Amino acid sequence: MYKKFRFIVFLLVLTIFLTFTLSACKKDELKTIRLIEVTHSLFYTPQYVAITQGFFEEEGLKIDLINGKGADKCMTALLSDEADIAFMGPEASVYVYNQGKEDYAVNFAQLTQKDGSFLVGREKDDNFNFEKLRGKTIIGGRKGGMPEMALEYVLKKNGLEPGKDVNVRTDIQFDVMAGAFIGGEGDYVALFEPVAASLEKEGKGYVVSSIGKEAGYIPYTCYCTTKSNLEKNPDTIQSFTNAIYKGMLWVQNHSVEEIAKAVKPQFPDTDDEILITLITRYKEQDTWKPDLILTEEGLNHMMDIIEMAGELDKRADYDKIVTTKFAEKAMETIKMR
């Protein structure tokens, strides 16, 4: 009887050992992808869901996530081979292509279709209108960046001319805009979440308007990689796209409470109630694209906005800086989750 018991214990120990060994081997086999994101925000919830729910691992990938703190820095990292994939506004790829670079950036999947920033003022204002910005100063972000250009687009739609009716500051780096505002700079600032909500919680600023809601559809944030990487590693790009699409479908088919729980590991310092509120806010304004396709019409609309901001001398060729084959294949093969 004792020998039988020892044998059973031995089998259990062996099973546990083999399970951990095989699991470790499987993890060792995962290919690491250096993914640089323009900022770390709930605006990109489907991406974080793909990470926390193991969708990248299902596709044989491990994500090394880097906060680029600005599209210019993301593009620099991508072109200097410090990142494999960059996640930012497609305007950056337009600029690079127009510079005549041989190994330019190609967009292969779109995630967001609205601006993700919110206009934050110093006082709570339930009756805000854009006329209140006349003669005021807004900290708007880097000149030529999509957040700043979307802000200018909204101002013009509301009859305000930047530089004349309202001062839009572009001299403060993206990652220190909130700090500058808290320090007394500007009357308003355009911020992403959860930063805007953090200011509200601390009583240092209040959301008065959604830039995304005001601006309407814009192909705002896309995944891109270099032309050479796309050609050398198509299977990896496909696996990455598959994982992102799984995350998008998961978000579409789960409650905001479930989504908040899923992204919590990415935002451990944000209160659960704030997570739910912000995810609800983004979901209700139709932030996330229902598919992965960056269309030619969408790219042209974005270039219209860049031209309106005076930042574009020449339009980029859609067929050069966009490919839809990876997105189309993912959408054909990945089912509802």
Image (cartoon, helix red, strand yellow):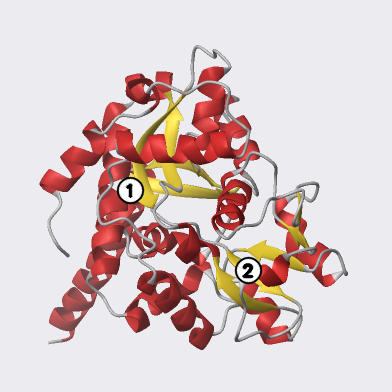
Write down the residue under mark 2: 130
Give the residue drawn at x 17%, y 39%. Answer: 329
Comparing 305 with 110, the one in front is 305
Comparing 125 with 201, the one in front is 125
Side (left or right) of 127 relative to 199: left
Q: Secondary structure at mark 2?
A: helix
Q: Residues within 10 Å of mark 2 (few under 14, many from 20)?
A: some
In which quadrant will I find the C terminus?
bottom left
Foreground mark, 1 or 2, reads 2
Is residue 90 at all visible to an observer of this figure?
Answer: no
Specify the amino acid type for callout 2: Phe
Comparing 153 with 122, the one in front is 153
Residue 57 in percent (x, y) is at 31, 52
Q: Secondary structure at mark 1?
A: helix
Q: Which tag, 1 or 2, sits closer to the chain's start?
A: 1
Specify the amino acid type for callout 1: Cys
Asked if 298 appears above or below 27 in the picture, the reply is above
Side (left or right) of 335 relative to 196: left
Is residue 264 at all visible to an observer of this figure?
Answer: yes
In which quadrant will I find the N terminus?
bottom left
Write down the residue under mark 1: 25
Residue 265 in percent (x, y) is at 49, 71
Give the residue drawn at x 80%, y 63%. Answer: 135
Asked if 231 appears above or below 15 in the picture, the reply is above
Residue 309 in percent (x, y) is at 61, 39
Give the residue drawn at x 59%, y 64%. Answer: 192
Q: Marks 1 and 2, Cα distance to the nearest angstrom?
A: 57 Å
Asked if 109 appears above or below 100 in the picture, the reply is below
Residue 93 in percent (x, y) is at 50, 30
| Quarter residue 208 falls in | bottom right
